[in-house]
Amino acid sequence: MTTGTADAGLLARDARVIAGVEKLRFFPLAVVSGSGHTLVEEDGRELIDLSASWTASGFGHGEPTIAAAVACAMVDAPGASILSATHPEAVALAEELLALVPGRVPDDERRVYLGHAGTDANDVAIRGCRHATGRPGIIAFENGYHGGIGTAQRVSGVHVACGVPADPDVVLLPYPDVYRPHTGDAATVVDDVLARVEAELVRGTTAAIIVEPVQSDGGVIVPPDGFLAGLRRLCDAHDARLIVDEVKVGLGRTGRTHAFSYDGIVPDVVTLGKALGGGLPLSAAVGPADVLDAPIASALMTTTGNPASCAAGRAVLEIVRTGDAVANVSDRGAQLRALLERYAVTERPGARHVGDVRGRGLSLGVELVGDRESRHPASDLTAKAVYRAWELGVVAYPVRGNVIELTPPLTITADAVDAAAEILARAIDDAATGVVTDERIAPFHGW
Ligand SMILES: Cc1ncc(COP(=O)(O)O)c(C=O)c1O
């Protein structure tokens, strides 16, 4: 029996059969294949991907060594789960993760939770910290993103701001943003946040702080030096655990294996996801046994640790260990950033709307504003710019309304970066000069 209508086009068929009024669509993108940093549409048109599926294809689409490892794992697969039977791929992946991620307790007191998504890894980490400390409180940050359902969602500032009920025991504090300082003064943001964190910790009810080392969906905000180190110090002083959510920027995206290492800290629990699966669903929480062995931390999902995802994860870790892709990040990140900064100081029509170009490695953000003095967020312009970029051949999505997030596959080439930067600049110019009408972007809800 055939399903669907072959000539209807993927988007029309998708609208008919796949649920979700809140699909995060910014332009009518339907892709039939991908390779490296290239996505191919139904009519064969090639696009440069500056999102990498929100970083889940972190090492490129269809990466050959990952594809081969997955194919191999599916032959004579030892089941599909580690719930009631262990198997070599899962154990080896956990061993390799323990070797890659630093810990604060001896290795034989550390564990790895294997999950499907950043959401369940964070959920498990939070529940485990609550159990281990016997405390309910969680400190998280406004505009933070830790998951799309459950506790991970209810401690995510982005969701709470949109009306999702907050976890009853979460306290959301400002994240230190030097472009939009909540104190009004970039120099005081870190001290102010740390003072607020401490005021909460002294109550003695906090189990853990959960924090992104770069606040990605909240606007690609790199915290000033000393922020994570301050959180580490305060957690130690008040017996709280520090969960660093590396789901989006871990495994090389910032130019280092772990983004938290820029502030010289070692977290209690590190969560990984997205790129870890090399395109397949896979996540991990790496932390102490008292957190991750807690019965309440267990997520009990049947396909947890399935051999194909674990094999993909092991192939990804091998790519990280060999270092070539991660070495590419610094060069390509600096190149992309410099091209955008150069555009911002030209007399071109969109340039004056570039309020800030920021980020770390290949986690970059271009914040569009009405004008540089008011810094008024130009969300409508941003929606039109990403739409136009797609028309011109680049895929990039906005975060927090007015920031174009650039997270290409870490393997992107110099030529592709040159081409993509010029397309982005032209797209911003065209959006600023009215080339994209309100009607064209109206069907796309975005965030
Ligand atoms: C920092 C961070 N943590 C966790 C998540 C949730 O990951 P997933 O969507 O795979 O559940 C995301 C997703 O965007 C994220 O950016």
Image (cartoon, grey):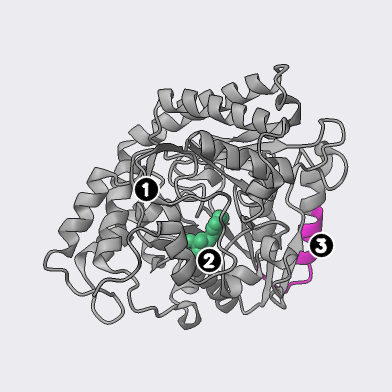
* Mark seen at residue 5: none
Amino acid found under the numbered disc labelled 3: Ala
Q: Which residue is mark 2?
A: 122
Is residue 389 depicted above or below 213 in this figure? above
**Sequence-wise first label, 1 or 2:** 1
Instruction: Estimate the spatial distance between the alpha carbons at disc 1 and disc 3, rounded to whole Å.
Output: 55 Å
Determine whether label 1 and label 3 are within 8 Å by CB. Answer: no
Per the image, label 3 sits on a secondary structure element best described as helix
**Sequence-wise first label, 1 or 3:** 1
The residue closer to the viewer here, 422 or 170, is 422
Can I make out residue 222 in this image? no
- Which residues, given as a range, are shown in magenta? 195-207
Per the image, label 2 sits on a secondary structure element best described as helix
Is residue 360 depicted above or below 244 in this figure? above
Q: Which residue is mark 1?
A: 42
Give the x, y percent position of residue 370.
Answer: 81, 36
Is residue 306 depicted above or below 93 in this figure? below
Mark 2 near ligand 1 (CB under 8 Å)?
A: yes
Q: Nearer the viewer, mark 1 or mark 3?
A: 1
Residue at 87% x, 46% y is 183
- Choose top left, top right, bottom left or bottom right for residue 25: bottom right
The residue closer to the viewer here, 60 or 152, is 60
| Structural crowding at the residue carrying mark 3, measured as other residues with C-alpha within 10 Å and reported as few (<14), some (14–19) or many (≥20) | few
**Sequence-wise first label, 2 or 3:** 2
Q: Which residue is mark 3?
A: 199
| Structural crowding at the residue carrying mark 2, measured as other residues with C-alpha within 10 Å and reported as few (<14), some (14–19) or many (≥20) | many
The number of numbered badges drawn on the structure is 3
